[in-house]
Amino acid sequence: MRVGSLLLSSLLLLTACGQARSSAVQGPPEAPGKAYDVAGRFDAQVLGSRLVARQRGWPGPRMPVAPPPRKIDCKQLKCVALTFDDGPGDGTGAVLDALAAHRARATFFMLGQMVTDETRGFVRRMVSEGHELGNHSWDHPSLVGLSQEALRRELQRTQDVVRQVAGVKMRLMRPPYGSTDKGVEDATREEGLSQILWDLDTLDWRDRNAALVAKRSGEAKPGDIVLMHDIHPTTVEALPRLLDELDRKHFTYVTVSELIGSLTPGKAYHKE
């Protein structure tokens, strides 16, 4: 009986090993505890970070995996960086759909208070589709004039919630209203954040007119950072049209970091 039991145990062990090996070859299984890279290979570091996330009570069994970095030479290509502020909101999914249809990557400057149970899926999708995430404060005050403690709290709370939801440490921030000073520079430098302003303001926050927003966006020049807001239905409506126009002009859609390259924390880039 002992011999039979040993044989049966050995067969079960071999079968389990064969199944595990087969799973590794075929790609990620459905088990939530496993972690694989974009090529379907097991990654112990990713698994470790996700297990820590689960222990801390962070939402979801998996953190999104970003696609590999791209090599883009904006000195040779007509690059434009589309940016969206104040979300994520109800229209963010449609914005992501339009960008995906044009294989366009963008940068989203998010308010921490907008990252909720209802919108966290958009944040995770941004990462998995190659978009860049940026800090836009917690609840959109003018950072100029805040105490250093209040200023840091605005930045850190947003850093924390995005890291919890998507496993990303953001390196960019956009000061609300574009308002910045030496105090904001000092706080962002300490937080490891570069300040990103813009070149082309579509004024979609003022003129809720899809045709007008699309027309203004279509006037972008190579190297521009374009300011929009993914919380306005008229901007969501305008996006397919403006992408069609920029496609016609042979623009390449890049993230802010792809456009600028090396970034210095605290420094402000691209003033309107």
Image: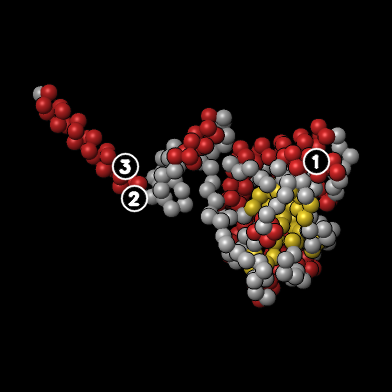
Name the N-terminal-most of marks 3 and 2. Answer: 3
In the image, is 49 to the left or to the right of 224?
A: left
What secondary structure is marked by label 2?
helix
* Quadrant in which the N terminus is drawn: top left
Give me the C-alpha separation between circle 3 and circle 2: 9 Å
At label 1, which amino acid type do we have?
Answer: Asp
Q: Residue 56: x and y, percent?
A: 57, 30
**Which residue is labeled 1 in the image?**
186
Q: Which scheme is used to colour this image of the protein?
A: secondary structure
Q: Quadrant of residue 226?
A: bottom right
- 147 shown above or below 95: above
- How many circles with numbers are drawn on the protein? 3
Give me the C-alpha separation between circle 1 and circle 3: 51 Å
- 103 shown above or below 182: below
**Which residue is labeled 2 in the image?**
25
What residue appears at the point 81 percent right and 44 percent down from the top-left corner? 185
At label 2, which amino acid type do we have?
Answer: Val
**Which residue is labeled 3 in the image?**
20
The circle on residue 178 is none
In the image, is 75 to the left or to the right of 13?
A: right
Name the N-terminal-most of marks 1 and 3. Answer: 3
Q: Residue 63: x and y, percent?
A: 53, 42
Along the line of sight, the residue nearer the viewer: 89 or 217: 217
Along the line of sight, the residue nearer the viewer: 223 or 162: 223
Neighbours of disc 2 within 10 Å: few (<14), some (14-19), many (20+)? few
Q: Residue 254: x and y, percent?
A: 65, 62
Give me the C-alpha separation between circle 2 and circle 1: 49 Å
